[in-house]
Image (cartoon, grey):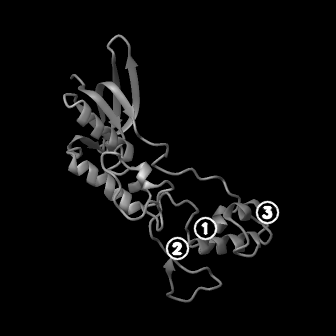
Amino acid sequence: MAAEHFDVLIVGAGLSGIGAAYHLRRDCPGKTYAILEGRAAIGGTWDLFRYPGIRSDSDMYTLGYAFKPWREAKAIADGPSILNYVRETARDNDIERHIRFQHLVKHAAWSSADARWTVEATTADGSTATLTCNFLLMASGYYRYSAGYTPDFPGMERYQALAGGLGLHRQNGGRHRLRRHRRNHRPGDGQDCSQGHHAAALADLYGVSPGGGCVRQLAARPPARHAGL
């Protein structure tokens, strides 16, 4: 069975991928294309990271699209606003129907003899979809979306016990419910996780005063009170 062929395949339906699709549609209207998105939603970075307070580190007047100027009051925008901006761009420019969701690209090979790329992607049911294209555009970002990098911090198991099972990494974050640190805990009491809770657990683990430095500085100190770690 012949692989499905496109003039262009775009990998990633985030800010860059949706922008690329717009320019392709506008400047090369006769070209066929598809967007391969490994996840089940548009937005890339801005759909992946949902923790409270996430926002851009660049002004959106620069980061945004020239064809769709940023109109919000805040230039350093919050994550939900940016996600809405990307989704709105895809919806308003008829890009959504070109997206193949849950198509995680695993392999791409160029053939000079055939002058085309062969791309293999794992789909939602675990099968492999094979597609070919004349031009392959990578707009997949630089995150490992399945799981963020987690260093091997000595004493992490003890830390997680103190912090109610919560690790340091926020890639899979969101708004969690977390019991208070044991010294402040009251039965039935709980509140949203915060940086303060992480600091309290680290302080207990490493025998230092909370608020006395950043996580890196705390983690760099040898355990003072838990020598058995």
- Residue at 74 percent across and 76 percent down: it is 209
Tell me, for residue 193, which label it has, or none: 2
Quadrant housing the C terminus:
bottom right
What's the residue type where badge 2 is placed? Cys
Q: Residue furthest top?
A: 113
Q: Are marks 2 and 3 in contact (CB under 8 Å)?
A: no
Image location (x, y in percent) of residue 198? 61, 70
Query: Does residue 21 appear to the left or right of 163 in the view shown?
Result: left
> SS class of the residue under badge 1?
helix
- Is residue 158 rendered to the left or right of residue 97? right
* Residue pointed to by mark 3: 222
199, above or below 144, in the image: below
* For discs 2 and 3, the disc positioned in front in the rendered view: 2
* Position above or below: 210 against 123: below
Distance Cα–Cα, label 1 vs label 2: 13 Å
The quadrant of the picture occupied by the N terminus is: top left
First in sequence, mark 1 or 2: give its number. 1
Relative depth, front residue between 206 and 35: 35
Q: Quadrant of residue 109?
A: top left
Q: Could you say where residue 203 lies in the image, as x and y percent from the top left?
A: 71, 72
Q: Amino acid at mark 3?
A: Pro
- Residue 218 at x, y = what percent? 72, 65
What residue is drawn where x is 48% and y is 67%?
Answer: 53
Residue on which disc 1 sits: 160
Secondary structure under tag 2 reads loop
